Amino acid sequence: MAPVIFITGATSGFGAATARLFASNGWNVVATGRRTERLEKLAAEFPGQVHPVTMDLTVRESIEAAVAGLPEAFRPITCLFNNGGLALGTGAIPEIDTDQWRTMIETNVMGLLHTTLAVLPLLREVGKGASIINVGSIAQRFAYVGGNVYGGTKAFVHQFSMNLRTDLAGTGIRITSLEPGHAKSEFTAVRTGGDFEANETMYADNDPLLPEDIAGTVWWLATLPAHVNVNLIEIMPVCQVPSRPVVLKRDAFEG
Ligand code: NDP
Ligand code: 8X3
């Protein structure tokens, strides 16, 4: 039977590129997300190889139903790509919307947890060589104005990945926290509430990571020899440069 990758957020960006790469290389793909039409289009590109499932990460029952309903050929899950997620809003505290905070936490944190729990029994059946790849972000380590809760959810992903390795010791399942920087997808359109022009501008005069770069990294991770675990990968485009913390002048302080 073909190995299977279970992908959250397969309707766009990293998830869609990863689905295409794995399906092109003979894997069976469980492609999940809320936008059913996009999933069906993806499935039509690879007849019989992509199982599209409409699934909302913020609804636990939706995740459990997706896993329970998997056809036999899509049950030996060798890789779980916990990728679905989002940032909402760019405001600094306190200029924020707490509903956006809740959505980010329910999606990036609770959605990832519930998916992991639901898929775990199938990963354990595969055992040695199986892997979980969790998408964090450089926002978990590098602070920026407006990154507040988004960065917090990704810090959760980082530490949860490390803790999960400890809990699953002896199962043979590898776990990686994959932490990308500036990458072109629909991320900025979602963050700005649907501003696709802002999305284009963000990447117009620079060379960001592309979804295919992330897909290639996921492929490398999933196909490493079974005894190798990469704990974390922080990956940026060459055009993105880490910088040191800022120092405020005295007159920048209130009062
Ligand atoms: P996209 O917006 O292009 O893709 C996000 C995916 O997440 C979509 O497929 C979307 O599917 C899915 N998703 C969002 N909310 C839900 C939900 N409630 N239920 C199910 N699926 C959901 O962005 P990216 O490809 O860039 O994002 C993928 C991951 O990478 C995210 O976790 C993001 O935080 C992270 N990331 C992105 C970076 C970037 O610069 N682009 C850098 C570092 C990390 P649908 O809307 O159909 O449900
Ligand atoms: C997305 C990267 O730095 O725009 O996770 O938040 S960043």
Image (spheres, rainbow, N blue to C red):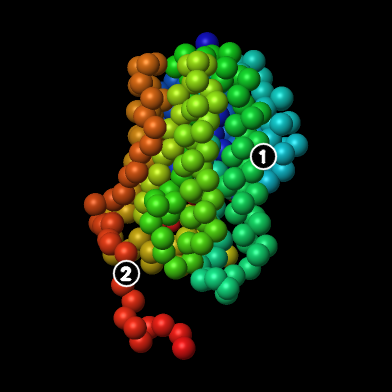
Give whichever of discs 2 and 1 has the lower sequence position: 1
Q: Residues within 10 Å of mark 1 (few under 14, many from 20)?
A: many
Q: Which mark is residue 251?
A: none
Image x and y of residue 103, in percent: 64, 55
**Left or right: 47 as drawn, with respect to 53:** left
**What residue is rendered at 50% in x and 20% in y?**
169
Residue 254 or residue 184, whichever sits in front: 254
The residue sitting at the left extreme is 238
Q: Residues within 10 Å of mark 2 (few under 14, many from 20)?
A: few
Three-letter code for the amino acid on which mark 1 is drawn: Met
**Left or right: 236 as drawn, with respect to 126:** left
The residue where tag 1 is placed is: 55
Q: Is residue 71 in sight in this rendering?
A: yes
Residue 102 or residue 35, whichever sits in front: 102
Q: Is label 1's Cβ within 8 Å of ligand 1?
A: yes
Q: Which mark is residue 246?
A: 2
Classify mark 1: helix, strand or loop.
loop
In the rendered structure, are the residues bearing label 2 and label 1 in contact, judged by CB atoms less than 8 Å apart?
A: no
Three-letter code for the amino acid on which mark 2 is drawn: Val
Q: Is residue 251 above or below residue 178?
A: below
Q: Is residue 138 above or below residue 97?
A: above
Image x and y of residue 218, in percent: 40, 33
**What residue is rendered at 38% in x and 83% in y?**
252
Between tags 2 and 1, which lies in front?
2
**Left or right: 13 as drawn, with respect to 234:** right
Q: Quadrant of ligand 2?
A: bottom left
